[in-house]
Amino acid sequence: MKKLRMCNASSGRLLRGTMAGLLAVAMLAGCGEADEDRRYDAGSAAGGETTASADTAQTASGASVAARSSEASKTPENSGSTPLSTSKQDRSLSLPPEKQQRPEPQAGMLTAGEWDDLGAWSRWMKLVQDSPYPAAWGFAPTKRLAVQVMAQGEPARDAEVILHCGGKREWTARTDADGKATLFADLLEAEDGQEGPIRNEPAAPTEGKGSIEDRPAAPQGCSVQIDAGHGLIVRDAETKDWAGRVMKLETEREAPQPDAVLDLLLMIDTTGSMADELDYLSTELTNVVSRVKKNIGQDLTVRISPNFYRDRKDEYVVRSFPFLEDAVKAQAHIARQEADGGQDYPEAVAEALTDAVLEHDWSRSAKARLMLLVLDAPPHQGEQERESIQLAAAEAAKQGIRIVPIAASGTDLETELLMRTLAVATGGSYVFLTDDSGIGNGHKKPEGVEPQILPLNDLLVDLISRYAGGEA
């Protein structure tokens, strides 16, 4: 703005003489260039439809990408990352210069990492104990009990597992492809540390032992109940079970197999701050949908629901679509989206979670149910939003819906820890975009992690296939 005022004032004085007039013309031309810069910076939305082919090239650009090892997310290294808090206003001013040409979106360009906090529990405990954020949203994700259910030596999949404490149903989860589930006591608490009104359920895998000083006091009077299809199995939880030991429950009867179904729901933030990456994300996700359908669609019925959200007072709050078996239609819905709206930093995340969990026809029996939540900003803060998010997490875990957040550029520490909490509570993992691709604004490195970096589309295809119990 200073440059524009200088140009307008100077041009008035210079037009008084012939030579001055010529100089003024030159300066006005400079003003036009400045005005063009302003128009570019203001137009942060990435418009147009994305029509990339679902099977486009999968070669990552930017820095070289390390090959993934099967144990990468289970044996992470420590990291001293620095918290980053970025407002929507800050990000709108850091768009690429006008003359910088953005590469045409192709599948395999974005890079990302994946982190499983359930597989690195002592680090997670230290992180949340040193941070106010999970508690600010009413979560205390520290008292966990890992369970594995086996039937005739084989994992019992999609079996309901219930934790009772003090005669009350505390948490409910469903087992994964390995027959594992994670139960929680006192997960949903009020901000002052008192237990809130919601007492329901999550689901998860993996073990991880923390040091004694990291562990909260073991809950008393708790038992685990499992319905493996031939009557209930009940076992009391011991102190060692809360200290990291996996509680193993076995039955000699054959467990019923879940339906050969994969439910895959996408919930994508399409506000203006996503403009730097939305076209690329659309291309990556259409490629993922196509590859998942091709790789495991012959063994499973793959149902896909693409959904999008913005904020209150925008064109829409949540744009919702039902589950579809037609992958081409799902891809078309993704490709048509544009980034716009969202004038403040928080967005309608609570409304998006409520719609995704409670307003969709999830399969009652399935090999896997996954929600990919793509976002770059936290929810609005308020009692209603807090309760909605708690309820969505509890209901997702109860139904066996594993939440997998995908953090885009500009994600701050509060958003990161809330999303990692939702992943922990529902048995999902945390995915985050990185700067290795050279695309988009700056990406925050998650706290305390050192994962392998992969092309986003390859990472997601592998992740979905693992949860579904198939091959990537």
Image (tube, helix red, strand yellow):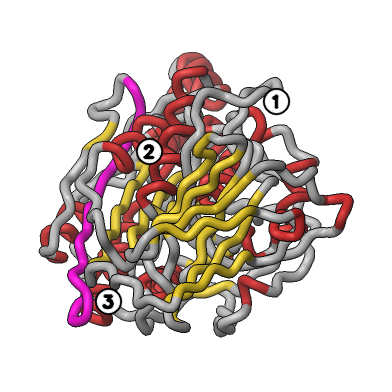
Badge 1 or badge 3: first in the primary sequence:
1
Up the image or down, 348 lies above or below 333; here it is above
Local crowd at mark 3 within 10 Å, few (<14), some, or many (≥20)? some
Mark closer to the observer (2, 1): 1
Task: Find out whether residue 203 is within the magenta segment.
Answer: no
Measured as percent of width and height from the top left, residue 359 is found at: 24, 37
Up the image or down, 419 lies above or below 332; here it is above
Q: Which residue is mark 1?
A: 193
Disc 1 marks a residue whose amino acid type is Gly
Task: Find out whether residue 304 is within the magenta segment.
Answer: yes
Give the residues drawn in magenta, as a range: 297-312
Up the image or down, 22 lies above or below 443; here it is above
Mark closer to the observer (2, 3): 2
**Residue ID at (85%, 58%):** 211
Measured as percent of width and height from the top left, residue 278 is found at: 36, 51
Q: Is residue 277 left or right of residue 243?
A: left
Q: Which mark is residue 353?
A: 2
**Residue ID at (64%, 51%):** 144
Disc 2 marks a residue whose amino acid type is Leu
What's the distance in space between the residues labelled 2 and 1, CA to CA?
A: 24 Å
Q: Nearer the viewer, residue 246 or 252?
A: 252
Q: Is residue 250 left or right of residue 254?
A: right
What's the distance in space between the residues labelled 1 and 3, CA to CA?
A: 45 Å
**Residue ID at (79%, 59%):** 210
Total numbered labels: 3
What's the distance in space between the residues labelled 2 and 3, CA to CA?
A: 26 Å
